[in-house]
Amino acid sequence: MVIPCQFLESLVLMGLVEVESMRTGCVIKDKDAGDVSKFLNRILGLAVEKQNLIFNYFTEAMKVIIKNAKKEGRYNEGMLDITATSIQLIGKPTEIFSNLSRGHGTTQSALLKVDRGMSWEAALKKQEHSGGSGNFYVSKRDMWGRKMYILATKKDNSSHLYTICRPNTGVSAFDEEKSDLLRKYSQIDVAAAEKGWKDMYQSSGDGCMHGDSCRQRAGCSVGSRTYKLHLICGNIVTLMSVLECTLNKFSVKYGLSKYESHIRVVRVELDTGERIVGVRYPEQLIIEVEKALIERNMIEQAQSQAMISQGQEGQVLIDPPKLKTFQSITEDVASVVPRCYKKAITPPLTIKNFFKPSTSNTDSSKPTVKTECLSVSYEDFTKDVCGGDANPSDSDSIALNRAKTKDNNSQSLKKQTVEILKESKNMSKKRTANNSVFSPTLKRRKQETLFSTFAKQSSQKEVKKDISCPICGLKFEEGLGNDKINEHIDNCLIE
């Protein structure tokens, strides 16, 4: 098949084909091979001419595939076809939801009896049609107290896959590997398989494969050859929402299986040739669906009556089924909750306001005195506190004299600070945050960089010390070598 260049270019632009793989052939990526929605979305990114080209090719290819599938009998329209050896209608279909459903059609309930088993005669015919590749097998181990018999026929165009047929369930939907078949079963002749096949076919007519040891024998249908199928036919489109809601609500209460908990459209063909199409639905939930429909109709009638009464009071009358009502409610202003109000006005906690500054435990009875900071040297404070002699520097004495002449209250301030220092001296060296009077915050030292270190070292002047002889005290000249210094010291020692 020759692919046009425009088609290949479009696939590359859509990202479905890599350029490197075009040398060996047009190969679609595995992850994009079955994603139709992605393929259709990628088409929108192309030019209009290329969009038409790709989409026309897609539709033509789909038509050819559907045509071939219909010829081969593999075309599926989305319905579940029930295939069995015998399907019979139990009684006549009964009408349900007569006064509750919408529309002009009727809704009916049909109960079917499905026989999916394979008789001994049908097994022999299937073995003959297999062309000699079909054989009977018996299980090596007992299951529920008895042996299991099967008919295995080789699948067409395959050397290791086999189609399995059982007397109670008929043709299996899953194929069996040859290795697994020989591991679990042993081949027997036709005469040895006849009795076991017939016994298994008769015993599975109305009961399950568990036998008498089953605790739920009345409702168990595992391995049963016949089972009942309940269908709802007719006008069911308007009831789908109610059917789905009721099934989801009561599936656990009624103990429904996973197979029964899903709605599925089913098509069956009776033994008489009549076809029935309907929705598979549990029969025990019909009463619950009727209750849900009655409740829905009562709500709709109440709403329609309310709308009619509003129309008679002077408002515009609208058709009740087409009216969408919106009810407004005016509530009184509620009182403010203190807890919510405090939460609303309180700023959120951050790293800045989480740690609060410490407060000193001062006596509230003493009057607070507003003080001012003075430039007083540390030597003056220690002299007054410790009573020792201190020699303050000239700058400190000048600053202290200026502070004394500045304000008359400076002497009283000094006495107060001296008393505070005396009290702090008697306290423990390890102070807590609450007992400390002065808690100055030390400024964090700025981290030095490599360049600042070099600049600091270069700015510092080298201070050279005078070198002298330790014996005679002679000062050596600058730039004198170590050998001459050592020679002089040796001579001094000898003398």
Image: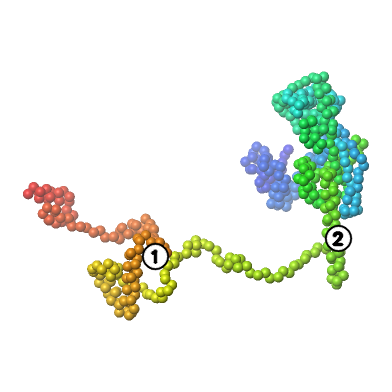
Label 1 crowding class (10 Å Cα cut-off): few <14, some 14-19, many 20+? some
For residue 311, above or below residue 129: below
Relative to 302, 479 lies left or right: left
Q: Which mark is residue 301?
A: 2
Relative to 76, 366 lies left or right: left
Q: Nearer the viewer, residue 363 or 381?
A: 363
**Which residue corresponds to the image point at 78% horizontal and 36% vertical from the top-left?**
216
Label 2 crowding class (10 Å Cα cut-off): few <14, some 14-19, many 20+? few
Secondary structure beneath disc 1? loop
Tell me where residue 190 sits by quadrant: top right
Q: Amino acid at mark 1?
A: Ser
For residue 462, above or below residue 6: below
Give coordinates of residue 206: x percent, y percent: 84, 33
For residue 272, above or below residue 237: above
Relative to 196, 477 lies left or right: left
Q: Nearer the viewer, residue 442 or 436?
A: 436
Q: Amino acid at mark 2?
A: Gln
Give coordinates of residue 35: x percent, y percent: 71, 44
Q: Nearer the viewer, residue 80 or 381?
A: 381
Tell me where residue 365 sits by quadrant: bottom left
Q: Earlier in the sequence, mark 1 or mark 2?
A: 2
Q: Nearer the viewer, residue 301 or 319?
A: 301
Tell me where residue 94 sits by quadrant: top right
Relative to 15, 203 lies left or right: right
The reply to whether residue 170 is in sight is: no
**Which residue corresponds to the image point at 92% horizontal and 42% vertical from the top-left?**
92
Q: Which residue is under mark 1?
A: 436
Give the position of the N terminus as an image quadrant.
top right
Give coordinates of residue 237: x percent, y percent: 84, 50
The residues tagged by marks 1 and 2 sit, at their Cα atoms, a distance apart of 80 Å
